Image (cartoon, grey):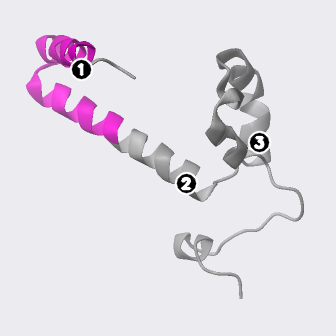
Amino acid sequence: MHHDADVVLALKAVADRLGAAAAQEAAMTCSAFNGLVRVADGIGIQLDEGTEANTRSARVELGLDQFGGATNTEVPEGPDVEAGSVMAMFAADS
């Protein structure tokens, strides 16, 4: 967890270098990605085979597979399921 002072210093450095609007946009972008990761972990989005293969060494090097949420990203066994739309991804099985 970052200390509040570290975040303030980082935002000040961005603002000093790129301006206040850029600092605000950077903070909002980071917040959005943080939220997306939490949603993905919460609903258990799995990695597709290509992403799993292409990120394997980086995940090992960074220790990402040691985090609890990593179990939600395992490639599922069985046939691939493709949704016709984003809403179909979240529809209950019929």
Pick the residue in front: 9 or 17. 9
Near mark 2 (Cα within 10 A), the count class, few <14, some 14-19 or many ≥20, is few
Residue of label 1: 4
Q: Which residue is mark 3?
A: 50
| Residue 24 x, y percent position in the rendering | 17, 32
Amino acid identity at mark 3? Gly
Residue positioned 64% across, 54% down in the render: 45
- Is residue 6 positioned above or below 33 on the image? above
The residue stretch that appears in magenta: 5-31
Q: Quadrant of the C terminus?
A: bottom right
**Spatial distance from mark 1 to mark 2, Cα to Cα?**
26 Å
| Residue 34 screen position, x and y as percent | 41, 39
Q: Viewed as shown, does residue 23 lie left or right of 26?
A: left
Give the amino acid at mark 1.
Asp
Judge the density around disc 3: few (<14), some (14-19), many (≥20) Cα neighbours within 10 Å.
Answer: few
Residue annotated with mark 2: 42
